[in-house]
Amino acid sequence: MVKVYLVTLGCPKNEVDSAGMAARLREAGHVLVERPASADALIVNTCGFIAPAREESLRVIRELARRKRPGQLLVAAGCMVTLHGDELRSIPGVDVLLGVDRLATVAEFLAEPERAVPTLPSPPLPYPGAGLSAVHGGSAYLKIADGCDARCAFCTIPRIKGPYRSASREVLLGEVQRLVAQGVQEIVLVAQDTTAYGRDRGEADGLPGLIEAVLEAVPELPWLRIMYTYPQHITPRLIDTIARYPQVCPYLDIPLQHAHPATLARMGRPTNVERVRVLLRRLRERIPDLVLRTTFIVGYPGETEAEFAALRAFLEEQAFERVGVFVYSREAETPAAQLPDPVPEEVAFSRREELMALQQEIARRWGQRQVGRIVPVLVEGIDRRAGLVVGRTRWDAPEVDGLVFAQGRARVGTIVPVQITAASAYDLWGTVVPERDRQGDPASQGSNRL
């Protein structure tokens, strides 16, 4: 038996991979521990997407290497290993390197440590080492695919993860049933592009069928959330499916990246901004109470003042409820790294601050409109001494969006109705509706069509 300390960095897909590694370690008779000092082996599931993520991975690995005691094993695993294995191999104290396609072998390397050379391409899903889900309290991420076929000029994911590979529907449905049986209240569908699900198998519109199959398999599931949808793959059938099933949260994450055709062309993204406007209008018309999340990149090579002004105007026009703004990170392995006219760092950060200030005001106005409403909240934490419940609404994805802080009592992992009494740019405050007042209240049942 080996005692293992496992650290996960990066996105929810990495969390799912770590959950898969943890399951395989337990199957092999090993035990996961919560403190590095108690471990025989230290594993860091790295993120290599952009420079800040790599810097965090390096910092964590170096710190663990500095503190490791004689006989402890240090394993660097995951995305950064696949793309930057040589950099990690040079760190004193790193004993094993496991790329994304070698995660299944983690238990083997604990038995017979050696330096592993990352290899590509990755095997097809469900590929060894990748889990299908990761549970956090009452929620679970379900990874429906891995890899990516898009060719965004700034992105390293296709080089790290390989081509798009959909998990089989049968395997996913089995996992969904297992999760709901153990009390999961919310399933969050994740992939590099959830809307491309099934395309690698010749299905032109596979995601709506998967959603329907999931909700037929587990009709008792209160919330189903969809992340990482690409605008060019959002079909009328998908919109109708979201609108038809009350279990599907009225929340859609659509990474748009920019709103000026010239910038989008340099990004290798769809350039028809008017088509995006039509899509967003159709979504809001068809899905009541819809909240939209998107992400934008500022400071992309060649981004002029006029292009940035167009992005700012688009943000103001569309009034997205949730927005993330990122400063462009130059990745040497990508086509974008060869583009001329880099934007000075101070200009890029200034543009980010400008957009975020605008977005905070938009989000604050949205929050104020929720005051007085009774909404379902998935409880994620409690403070018994203060009589406080902390959770999320159907409009907020785990780990990226805001929280609800409510006076009252409830159990972690349950969905309770909360009357909203105050709001800020990111969070809501309220009071848990007493049980005696909940009869017939759709919020107490987790309905998302209030």
Image (cartoon, rainbow, N blue to C red):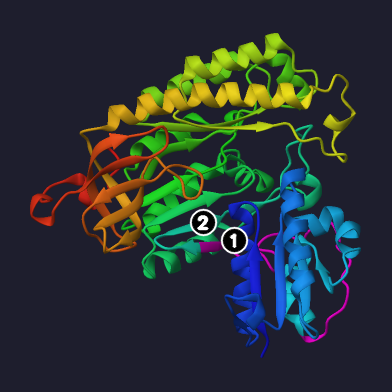
Q: Amino acid at mark 2?
A: Tyr
Residue plotted at (87% across, 24% down): 339
**Dot 1: few (<14), some (14–19), or many (≥20) neighbours within 10 Å?**
many
Residue plotted at (73% across, 31% down): 328
Picture layout, residue 304 above or below residue 298: above
Where residue 69 sits, quadrant-wise, is: bottom right
Left or right of 316 on screen, residue 146: right
**Residue 128 in sight here:** no
Q: Position of residue 43 (x, y in %)?
A: 71, 71
Picture layout, residue 354 above or below residue 31: above
Q: Amino acid at mark 1?
A: Val
Q: Determine the main secondary structure of the stretch shown in magenta.
A: loop
Q: CA distance from mark 1 to mark 2?
A: 7 Å
Outermost residue to the top: 306
Residue plotted at (47% across, 42% down): 401
Numbered circle sitting on residue 141: 2
Is label 1 in contact with label 2 (beta carbons under 8 Å)? yes
**Residue 381 in sight here:** yes
Q: Say which label, 1 or 2, has the lower sequence index.
A: 1
Left or right of 118 on screen, residue 132: left
**Dot 2: few (<14), some (14–19), or many (≥20) neighbours within 10 Å?**
many
- Secondary structure of residue under mark 1: helix
| Residue in front for this viewpoint, 203 or 100 | 100
Magenta residues span 111-134
Outermost residue to the left: 436
Q: Which residue is mark 1?
A: 16
Where residue 310 sits, quadrant-wise, is: top right
